[in-house]
Image (cartoon, helix red, strand yellow):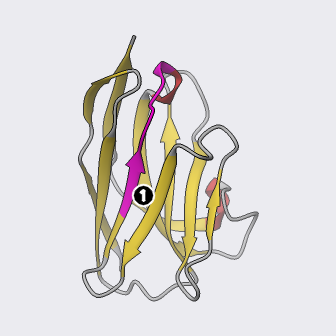
Amino acid sequence: QVQLVESGGGSVQAGGSLRLSCAASGYTYSSYCMGWFRQAPGKEREGVAAIYTGDGRTYYADSVKGRFTISKDNAKNMAYLQMNMVKPEDTGMYYCACGSTGVGPVLARSRYRYWGQGTQVTVSQ
C-alpha cells in the first residue's frame, strides 16, 4: 500500500511561486510515480505534470509548460512541483498520485492507483 502526503500549498499573489512536496511511503516502485493533479471548484480533476521513474522523463499540461517543474528524489521518496509565475487559474486543490494502472495517458486520472489528500493552492490577483 502506498501512502502519499502533500504539503506546501498556501496563498500567493499572481506572478509568485510555490513549491509543493509529496512524501511517499510504502511500495513506490512504479513506472509513473509521481503525477500531480489539480481540481478547481466545480471542475474535473486535471493532470498537471508527471515524471517517469525509469528515466526521469517529464510531462506537462500545456497550461503549465514553462512555468511548473516536476522533480523527484527517489532516495527520499519525495516528489516536488515547483510552481512559478502562478496565475489565478492555477487555484485549486493539488494532489499527488502514484502507481500506474496502465489505463489512459500519463496525465489522465485513470492512470494512477494511489492518491494523496491534497493541498490547497490559492492564487490572487
Residue farthest to the right?
A: 104
Q: Is residue 31 above or below residue 67?
A: below
Q: Is residue 111 above or below residue 1?
A: above
> How busy is the neighbourhood of tag 1: few (under 14 within 10 Å), some, or many (20 plus)?
many
Q: Is residue 17 above or below residue 25?
A: above
Q: Secondary structure at mark 1?
A: strand
> Whole-percent x and y of residue 8?
23, 46
* Residue position for label 1: 96
Magenta residue check for 97? no
Which residue is rendered at x = 36% and y = 61% of the image?
80
- Where residue 22 sits, quadrant-wise, is bottom left
Classify residue 75 as left or right of residue 91: left
Q: Is residue 122 above or below residue 103?
A: above
Q: Which residues are magenta?
A: 80-88
User: What's the amino acid at mark 1?
Assistant: Cys
> Whole-percent x and y of residue 35?
52, 62
Which residue is rendered at x = 52% and y = 85% of the image?
30
Classify residue 75 as left or right of residue 114: left
Q: Nearer the viewer, residue 61 or 25?
A: 61
Residue farthest to the top?
A: 125
> Whole-percent x and y of residue 110?
66, 60
Which residue is rendered at x = 40% and y = 73% of the image?
72
Magenta residue check for 86? yes
> Whole-percent x and y of residue 66?
59, 46
Classify residue 105 as left or right of residue 3: right
Which residue is rendered at x = 76% and y = 64% of the image?
104
Counting every numbered tag in the picture gives 1
**Split into 4 quadrants, where in the image is the C terminus?**
top left
**Split into 4 quadrants, where in the image is the N terminus?**
bottom left
